[in-house]
Image (cartoon, rainbow, N blue to C red):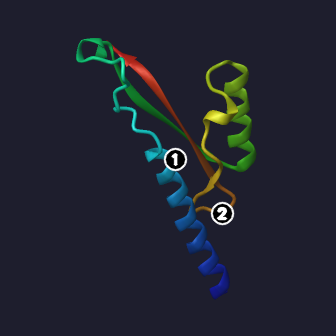
Amino acid sequence: MMAQSQKFVDNQQSAESKLEQYLHGEDVNTPTLNQSPENTFPKREPLKHLLIGSPKAVTSTIHRLQVTGYASVGDWSPLLPTANPDEVMSILIRQILMQ
């Protein structure tokens, strides 16, 4: 029983670390070489989509969103376990234009 508890804790810490790496992997506010302050309008803002459910439901939804042309399968984070048994999560970060 203790081995299962420790394995669960290790999996949770690993999942949180992976999610943190995914969320902070890109600095969307870093200006490019050709970008000047005048060219920053309209403003782009990150929007985070989070899917939580069974591995089958999350994977199915990710594939359905690719078929509709909204997001490629590769745009989503890997499936990460949650605190609930048989439940995973995946995140997609998109940049949207704000007026």
Q: Where in the figure is residue 12, as x and y percent of width and height?
A: 55, 66
Upstream in the sequence, badge 2 or badge 1?
1
Observer-side mark, 2 or 1, equals 1
Give the residue displayed 36% in from the left and 17% down from the top: 34
Q: Which mark is residue 78?
A: none
Residue corresponding to mark 1 = 22
Give the residue displayed 24% in from the left and 12% down from the top: 38
Question: If the image is split into quadrants, where does the N terminus sit?
Answer: bottom right
Q: Where in the figure is residue 59, as x and y percent of width and height?
A: 72, 40
- Image-based side of 1 in relation to 95, left or right: right
Spatial separation of the CA atoms under disc 2 and disc 1: 22 Å
Question: If the image is split into quadrants, where does the C terminus sit?
Answer: top left
Residue neighbourhood size for the residue with mark 2, other residues' Cα within 10 Å, grouped as few (<14), some (14–19), many (≥20) = few
Q: Please give the count of numbered marks on the rendered protein.
A: 2
Q: Which mark is residue 85?
A: 2
Q: Would you place residue 50 above or below residue 41 in this image?
A: below
Residue neighbourhood size for the residue with mark 1, other residues' Cα within 10 Å, grouped as few (<14), some (14–19), many (≥20) = some
Q: Where in the figure is residue 47, as x and y percent of width and height?
A: 44, 31
Q: Secondary structure at mark 2?
A: loop
Q: Where in the figure is residue 13, as x and y percent of width and height?
A: 52, 67
Q: Would you place residue 85 above or below residue 48 in this image?
A: below
Q: Would you place residue 75 above or below residue 84 in this image?
A: above
> Most extreme residue toward the front, as rendered?
33
Residue in front for this viewpoint, 3 or 36: 36
Residue in front for this viewpoint, 35 or 23: 35
Residue in front for this viewpoint, 2 or 47: 47
Give the residue displayed 74% in from the left and 36% down from the top: 60
